[in-house]
Amino acid sequence: MFDALVDRLRVAVEDLTTKQNRRAVLIGHSYGAVVIYEFLTRMSDPWKHAHVEAYVPVAGPFGGAIGTVISTSAGYALDIKVPTFVRRDILWPVQSSAISGAYLMPIPAAWNASDS
């Protein structure tokens, strides 16, 4: 599935840089920063030189996110008051099985024990 996304992003960047006659600045926020990083690792250096002026990651969870541990284990709602009709026993299974959660688990080398 990620290969299809890579192809779509590559075509979009190529089309944009051709139409604008300049290289693109790729900006990714949150998990989008990680997605763009992974996309760029799959592109060749000559391709990046031809099409990318800069990559700007904004608040990317490159070391993982402790909130992922909380949501996976207990059903965390980002401190948002969840309406009473949305039961935690419904919310938690969705959060704990979300495929992106595996990619957002904290990387031990990036966290100190005191960071929790």
Image (cartoon, rainbow, N blue to C red):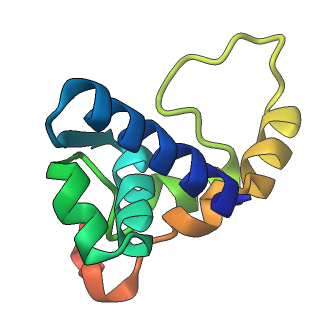
Observer-nearest residue: 96 or 51?
Answer: 51
**Percent of width and height locating residue 7:** 58, 53
Give the x, y percent position of residue 33: 34, 50
**Residue 33 appears left or right of 80:** left
Percent position of residue 90, x then y: 88, 34
Above or below residue 114? Residue 32 is above
Q: Which of 98 and 18 is in front in this view?
A: 18
Residue furthest bottom as drawn: 109
Residue at image location 23% in from the left, 75% down from the top: 114
Residue 111 visible in rendering: no
- At 38% from the left edge and 43% from the top edge, which residue is drawn? 14
Residue 11's place in the image compared with 61, above or below, is: above
Task: Say which residue appears at 43% left-offset and 48% top-offset.
Answer: 31
Quarter that holds the N terminus: bottom right
Q: In this view, does 102 lie to the left or right of 93?
A: left
Along the viewing direction, whichever of 33 and 103 lies nearer the viewer:
33
Which quarter of the picture shows residue 20?
top left
Quadrant for the C terminus, please.
bottom left
